[in-house]
Image: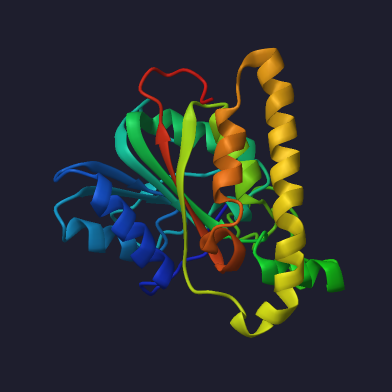
Amino acid sequence: MQSTCHDRYSDTMAVVSREILARAAAGARVLDIPAGAGRLGDSLREHGLTVVGADINGARPDTVMADMTRALPFRDGEFDVVVCMEGIEHIDNYHGLIGELARVTRPGGTLILTMPNIACLYSRLMFMCTGSFFQFWPTQFRVNVDGETLFDYGHITPLTWQKVAFHFAHHGVRLEALRGNKMKRKILWPIYLPFVLAGLPWTAYRLRRRGQEVRALENRTDFYRTIERHAYSRAALTSRNIVMVMTRKDDGQTAR
């Protein structure tokens, strides 16, 4: 699966870079996959970090060949920081990618994943009116007819940050923070506001009730508290792209 090759330093890269520099020590090993044209990696190297770019687009000779739909060619816990920026929405086997990203992150390390924010208010409104999420119009879907050709699939897998956080939790990776880039369609806030006000108590009730049910069985409620804490943040509600900042647990146990 070939990634889209971004040839400019985007606002999402700036957000990701700030999060990494706030957490990583000088010389920390960073995996950037899919690396695209390598703009994020170049910026991080200027700050003293050791960056390994991985992709299959062949945009740069210093990029390690790696296919996100298969096992990554790296050791367990090899990296202090793992970044997957605008990649997961391009593949169908996202469960496997999540497991691989968690595997190559060292215990206690940072994992940052970005993707289109289909849970933002603009995307919700678009889905209600058109049946399609923002950045996932049917005209963007592409087909790899022979199953082997290296190919850019476009945006084929719409995922909410809540669902991605749930899958990472099963690999011992905990969501710490949500960040976002630019606010999408601020002019529509008068339309959004009634839905936000109606959704606040509804969301809180559902998450707390579910958390109580799970606690009675397994004493696992931290995941639901985390989701509730971030569900109505500015990033979750308004950003075009969501930036998930996560940490792999030190003890290797499943995140709770």
| Horizontal arrangement in the rendering, residue 28 relative to residue 178 (left or right) | left
Q: In x, y percent, where is residue 40?
A: 32, 62
Q: How is the image coloured?
A: rainbow
Q: In x, y percent, where is residue 222?
A: 55, 30
- Hey, which quadrant is residue 106 in on the image? top left
Residue 76 lies, with reference to residue 37, above or below; the image says above
Identify which residue is drawn at 74% across, 78% down: 191
**Viewer-side residue, 33 vs 184:** 184
| Horizontal arrangement in the rendering, residue 234 relative to residue 137 (left or right) | left
**Viewer-side residue, 17 vs 140:** 17
Q: In x, y percent, where is residue 24?
A: 23, 44
**Viewer-side residue, 204 vs 78:** 204
Identify which residue is drawn at 60% across, 49% down: 161
- Hey, which quadrant is residue 141 in on the image? bottom right
Residue 98 seen anywhere in this rendered image of the structure: yes
**Viewer-side residue, 41 vs 162:** 162
Identify which residue is drawn at 61% across, 63% down: 237
| Horizontal arrangement in the rendering, residue 46 relative to residue 251 (left or right) | left
Q: In x, y percent, where is residue 76?
A: 38, 25
Residue 111 lies, with reference to residue 85, above or below; the image says above
Residue 196 lies, with reference to residue 252, above or below; the image says below
| Horizontal arrangement in the rendering, residue 83 relative to residue 172 (left or right) | left
